[in-house]
Amino acid sequence: MGSSLTIPTLSTNMIKTITTVKEMQAVSNELRKDKKIGFVPTMGYLHEGHLALVKKARELGDIVIVSIFINPTQFGPNEDLAKYPRDFDRDAILLEREKTDIIFFPDSKEMYPKGYSTYVQVRDLQNHMCGKTRTGHFVGVATVVTKLFNIVKPHFAVFGQKDYQQLKIIERMVQDLNMDIEIIGYPTVREQDGLAMSSRNTYLSPDERSRALLISASLTEAERLFRNGTRDVALIRQEVERVLKSKEGVDIEYVSITDPDTLEDITKIHDRALVAIACHVGKTRLIDNKVLMEEH
Ligand code: AMP
């Protein structure tokens, strides 16, 4: 967790929590008449990264709604659904502090009742990076985000660039399906030492955490090479992998250097490139990325 997050001992019962689809839709219908609704979907166990998205929504909207839902359809059979960290009371205190108006907190039966059969698939973008190993993950994401949009009815929603592929898929989906919702991307929030904040960082032992720092360090190295004029993707990949392998115990799933819009591999950087990494550190899967961009 973010070391800067001190949790007040006070409990909360001020913040409105809604658990049913029907009530959420009814409340949003009322609010939408004269208020701009901003929405931040999360899986809970909040850190400063999530809270930065909430602050952004607070800044841009009249009403801020945050969902907390650990979506089973985006987890594979061998993934960490059962042990994913949960602490609703703590999340509610943090959200209240950020002046969130409503928490939408449904359970799985509410979201996927008996007989549930409909899924949303965004083609092409799902075939790269995390989509190669996490089969079905982005169908789960696109499906739950569509459902949440239909339930919460926001004017805009804020997503983190930390999950870069997810952000691109949601942008594509909103465009393709003519959803009348503005998608706002927010830069990755990091710990002081560079580690991208993630609810999964809580799984890391102190030793694993120090090894995990190689991920952000390797991205910084990619940036340094780019700033020094390197445009050859093979060379940048080689250096990123060298940094990642400089200590034992960081297992690379992928180092992907691509066009930031299509996520297609490139061999030479012209104007911009996405460098995205997925690694296993111990049993924990971590992702991070950086967009390399010419300074005009
Ligand atoms: P999650 O709870 O992991 O599903 O994340 C909920 C939202 O928070 C997603 O839009 C994520 O991209 C975003 N998010 C997670 N970690 C960070 C971070 N370190 N910086 C910015 N946004 C983040």
Image (cartoon, rainbow, N blue to C red):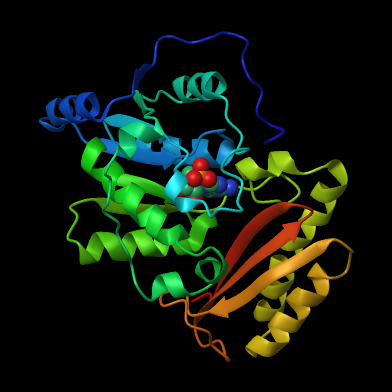
Q: Position of residue 101 (x, y in %)?
A: 34, 23
Quadrant of the frame with the N terminus = top right
Q: Is residue 143 visible?
A: yes
Q: Residue drawn at (24%, 28%), measured in percent from left and top?
A: 24
Q: Position of residue 137 (x, y in %)?
A: 47, 58
Q: Is residue 1 above or below residue 142?
A: above
Q: How many marks?
A: 0
Location of residue 211 by image quarter = bottom right
Q: Nearer the viewer, residue 164 or 147?
A: 147
Q: Residue drawn at (68%, 89%), measured in percent from left and top?
A: 234
Relative placement, left or right, of 152 versus 88 is: left
Q: Position of residue 109 (x, y in %)?
A: 35, 33
Relative placement, left or right, of 27 versus 275 is: left
Q: Is residue 27 above or below residue 161?
A: above
Identity of the residue furthest to the front in this view: 115
Location of residue 257 by image quarter = bottom right
Q: Is residue 228 visible?
A: no
Q: Is residue 187 above or below residue 14?
A: below
Q: Residue drawn at (51%, 39%), measured in percent from left and top?
A: 50
Q: Residue drawn at (24%, 37%), measured in percent from left and top?
A: 151
Q: Position of residue 43 (x, y in %)?
A: 49, 39
